[in-house]
Image (cartoon, rainbow, N blue to C red):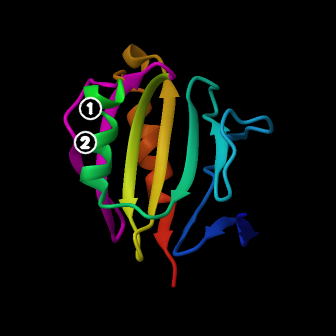
Amino acid sequence: MLQYKNGRFYAPGVSFALPEGFYLETMPDVCSEYGLAAWTPDKKYYLEWDLEEGCVGTERELAEMTSPDWGARRHSPVTAVRAGTLSGHRALYENKNGAFLEVRLALAAGRELVVRFVKKAADLREPGVEPYLETVLAGVRPEP
């Protein structure tokens, strides 16, 4: 479960803020122990935060899950990304469940914070999603 304190959500090793004006999704598509879902202020983009454990590295995780072997089609290469002092990777892909712009940030002890925008692939290639992604990533920080 997530702890909410001083305007931030806390999970093991990381905290993040729900950006101003975002809508908290009260009936999310995916429920997990450390997950949260929201909509952007214009209600155009749905996004999820999730903490995954037992990961093998952000680049490898994205490369494997976006491969045809997993029934996915990648619309962008897996590229490096930073959120403050955290580093990770991102990719745009789609599978039978939809299209995703996914960012994975490496945390300690094999954990990764996953930030995933969900929509049609064409919409996730629009420049409009990038400012929201930047805002979301600016709200992420490592915690002891």
Q: Nearer the viewer, residue 114 or 9?
A: 114
Q: Which of 117 and 44 is in front in this view?
A: 117
Q: In this view, does 17 lie above or below 39?
A: below
Q: Identify which amino acid the numbered label 2 is placed on.
A: Ala
Position of 130 compared to 68: left or right?
right
- Distance, label 2 to label 1, CA atoms, is 6 Å
- The part of the image, by quadrant, that contains residue 23 is top right
| Residue for point 31% across, 55% down | 58
Q: Which of 32 and 139 is in front in this view?
A: 32
The reply to whether the C-beta atoms of the residues labelled 2 and 1 are less than 8 Å apart is yes
Secondary structure beneath dot 1 equals loop
Secondary structure beneath dot 2 equals helix
Look at the image and give the residue range highlighted in magenta. 72-97
Position of 4 compared to 44: left or right?
right
Residue, disc 1? 67
Residue lying farthest to the bottom in this orientation: 144
Q: Where is residue 53 shown, x and y percent of the image? A: 49, 63
| Residue for point 38% across, 47% down | 103
> Mark 2 Cα within 10 Å, few/some/many (few <14, many 20+)?
some
Position of 29 compared to 52: left or right?
right
Residue 63 lies in the magenta-colored region:
no
Q: Where is residue 36 shown, x and y percent of the image? A: 66, 49
Q: Where is residue 29 shown, x and y percent of the image? A: 68, 32
Q: Where is residue 104 shown, x and y percent of the image? A: 38, 52
Residue, disc 2? 63
In this view of the protein, can residue 70 be seen by the observer? yes
Position of 81 compared to 131: left or right?
left
